[in-house]
Amino acid sequence: MKIAIVGASGAVGQEFLRVLSQRDFPVDELYLFGSSRSAGTSYSFKGKEYVVRKLKDNDDFKGIDIAFCSAGGDTSISFADTITRHGTLMIDNSSAFRMEEDVPLVVPEVNGDDALVHPRNIISNPNCTTIQLVVALQPIEKLSHIKRVHVATYQAASGAGALGMAELEQQAAQLAHGENPTVDKFAYQLMYNLIPQIDVFMDNDYTKEEMKMHRETKRIMHSDVLVSATCVRVPVMRAHSEAVWVETERPISPQEARKAFANASGVLLCDEPAKRQYPMPLYGTEQDPVIVGRIREDLANPNGLTFWCVSDQIRKGAALNAVQIAEYLIAKGHFDR
């Protein structure tokens, strides 16, 4: 297959290269694209060097089967026609098309078949926090319909890209040497701090990130579930954590939930509190599954269950999910010639 990565120099673009290699994805030809700033940079993939081309409005995508795109919403909107006009499937990591009815929004463990119909040759990768949430919710939904979800997220610096991670590292070093920390990518110092704002505030005083979780969860799960989120940036490098409270139509016992999580696709159960075994971002980093633990009854709701989950934001929250979408389509014969 002929594969392109748009935004190859970014954190997610680099993760695409790692994931494609580690999963032995069928790449016969690889093309890397980026901005004028990254054009000319070379990266290694399976022992061969590839040079980043400048993304232009031309016919560079003719003959390419799949373009994995992670260059930001503005770029996705500007170049969507360029990428797709000759039949290339664009799997887009930005928020540009997520709520458009003719663009499927897909997490393969939850709604993989939605990817089969993509009239605009575009499939959207959901928001990283939403991906993590719905993978964990799906095993519970199969037991009893989820009516409401309250979730508090603890989101890593990686959600702000490579520059966000670099700033956290820089602040740690500066503070260790008694220097004033550089504050540029984030609104405030992130090291030794929590910032209860991710993205801009909306008219209802929820942030755009929180509203993404509210809207995207419904769409992916084909559900009337109500989602209320509080999203917080924390001084962690690249794995997000979520504290989740669910209300189901019937009570779900922790034992029943543990069994469902243990058998669920894309989930790793880690729930032995007596042995201090529970998910942590330190151990979720560079791992594929959503790790679930701290499963218990909600003491404030007879039909409630609460749990804690962790997932690598760059991996399952971005690059891995996109590659899994492509793998799902390949398994369904979508690219058979």
Image: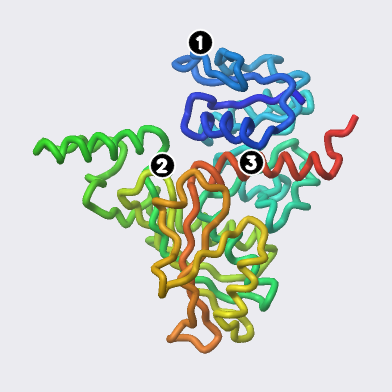
Question: In front: 210, or 307?
Answer: 307
Q: Which mark is residue 322?
A: 3
Q: How is the image coloured?
A: rainbow
Residue at the image point whose x is 52% and y is 89% from the top: 302
Which of the 4 image quadrants contains residue 77?
A: top right
Q: Earlier in the sequence, mark 2 or mark 3?
A: 2
> How many numbered marks does the figure carry?
3
Question: In front: 309, or 66?
Answer: 309
Q: In the rendered image of this protein, does residue 240 appear above or below residue 245?
A: above
The residue indicated by pointer 1 is 40
- Element under disc 1: loop
Q: Position of residue 226 (x, y in %)?
A: 56, 70
Residue at the image point whose x is 60% and y is 59% from the top: 267
Q: Position of residue 205 (x, y in %)?
A: 37, 61
Residue at the image point whose x is 74% and y is 52% from the top: 112
User: In the orientation shown, which residue stands out farthest toward the front?
Assistant: 275
Q: In the rendered image of this protein, does residue 229 appear above or below residue 337?
A: below
Characterize the local packing of mark 3: few (<14), some (14-19) or many (20 or more) Cα atoms within 10 angstroms: many
Q: Separation of disc 3 and disc 1 at Cα? A: 25 Å
